[in-house]
Image: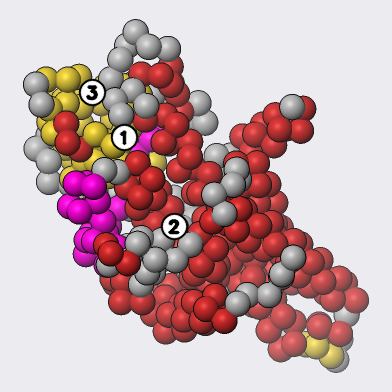
Amino acid sequence: MEFRLNEDQQMVRDSAREYAATHVLPGAAQRDVDREFPIVPFKKAGEYGFTGVCVPEEYDGAGLGSLELTLVLMEVNAACASTGVTLSVHNSLCLAALINAGNDDQKARYLGKLATGEMLGAYALSEAGSGSDAAALVCTARADGDEFVLEGTKLWVTSASHADMFVVFARTSQEAKRSRGITAFLVERDTPGFRVSKKEDKLGIRASSTCELVFEEVRVPAINVLGEVGHGFPIAMELLDGGRIGIAAQGVGIARASIEASARYAKERHAFGKPIAKFGAIRAKLAEMRARTDASELLTLRAAWLKDQGESHTVEASCAKLIASQNANFCAREAVQIHGGAGYLEDFPVERYMRDARITEIYEGTTEIQRMVISREVLA
């Protein structure tokens, strides 16, 4: 068992670290305040190959694996969680949908543009009555000749304000029970009848847009059905396994940033005549943060490695997301505590880390859902 990154993986990590420091971190705090979507950092990511990490080279992608994508996401999220989730959804959900289930024609039409960052991808599964219970969705798609007509709404769609391509799940059969009547579609932004509606005002990841989608007699050509009609739900679940690795990587990134900010502040802040880093209580916090983050990182890399080997990784992805998301919240809270009153101010980044960390236990499957997935395996 090898715990060290190979030379190529180190190069990917170092390139991501340079990209994050140069193009993501500057302005991250202001984008959060202004709710400004990170479209400029996203476009710059395309120049580094980070908008198509796992896309084969024949489609202008980097031709790398999930482990390399995970390394990129850890570095980016340490700088800005809003940019991190933008890249995660684009790579782990939209692009992965095309790679896993797309046919040759669909890949030829869309993969290259998405891989280079010319197009931004999004993923639309959740609805008002189907969040954790995704199979309860009611958005419909009825066949009409060589088209499908979509009707309904989708909620909580990441990057929707700027996305060009949406992977949309809709019910194509009312007779089939729950998940068996769901189909996946590729829907372009400029399709008549489709519109991006309400933009949510959120606690954290405020530079990332989260919007409602409305479908009113939206005609999607049958050639844009992803996979087979009625077999969309397994596609959605497989994608969420990869998406959970991406959010685990986000948790690791936020935790790392919290540790770095706390260590820096602890050495600079003096109390009772010496740096607070000299006090045992502060050292204990930093040690606990570091140990938990190392554990989170190893779980996340394990899940990514298993995915690259083509092995089952559903439970491992859930383990990684469960622990990494909880740890992100733990480390962010401790970072605010170490900063004391200063940690409650926007003058320091830890208040943003604390707000951003909260969502990691909610999207891509809540903490409770991860425990259901893991416990089901344990009891099996």
Is residue 123 depicted above or below 300 in this figure?
above
Distance in Å between CA atoms under marks 3 and 2? 27 Å
Residue at 61 percent of width and 53 percent of height: 306
Is 298 within the magenta? no
Q: In the image, what residue type sits under mark 3?
A: Ala
Q: Is residue 158 left or right of residue 294?
A: left
**Residue 258 x/y as whole percent:** 65, 70
Q: Which of 255 and 95 lies nearest the eye of the viewer?
A: 95
* Span shown in magenta: 104-128
Circle 1 SS class: loop
Residue 263: tell me if it is visible.
yes
Q: Which residue in the protein does label 1 denote?
A: 227
Q: Which residue in the protein does label 3 denote?
A: 141
Q: Which of 295 and 38 lies nearest the eye of the viewer?
A: 295
- As drawn, the label of residue 345 is none
Distance in Å between CA atoms under marks 3 and 1? 15 Å
Of the 4 image quadrants, the one containing the C terminus is: top right
- Is tag 3's residue or tag 1's residue first in the polypeptide sequence? 3
Q: Is residue 90 left or right of residue 237?
A: left
Q: Which residue in the protein does label 2 denote?
A: 88
Circle 2 SS class: helix
Q: In the image, what residue type sits under mark 2?
A: Ser
Do the residues under discs 3 and 1 have CB atoms within 8 angstroms?
no
* Residue that extends furthest to the top in the rendered view of this protein: 175
Q: Is residue 26 left or right of residue 112?
A: right
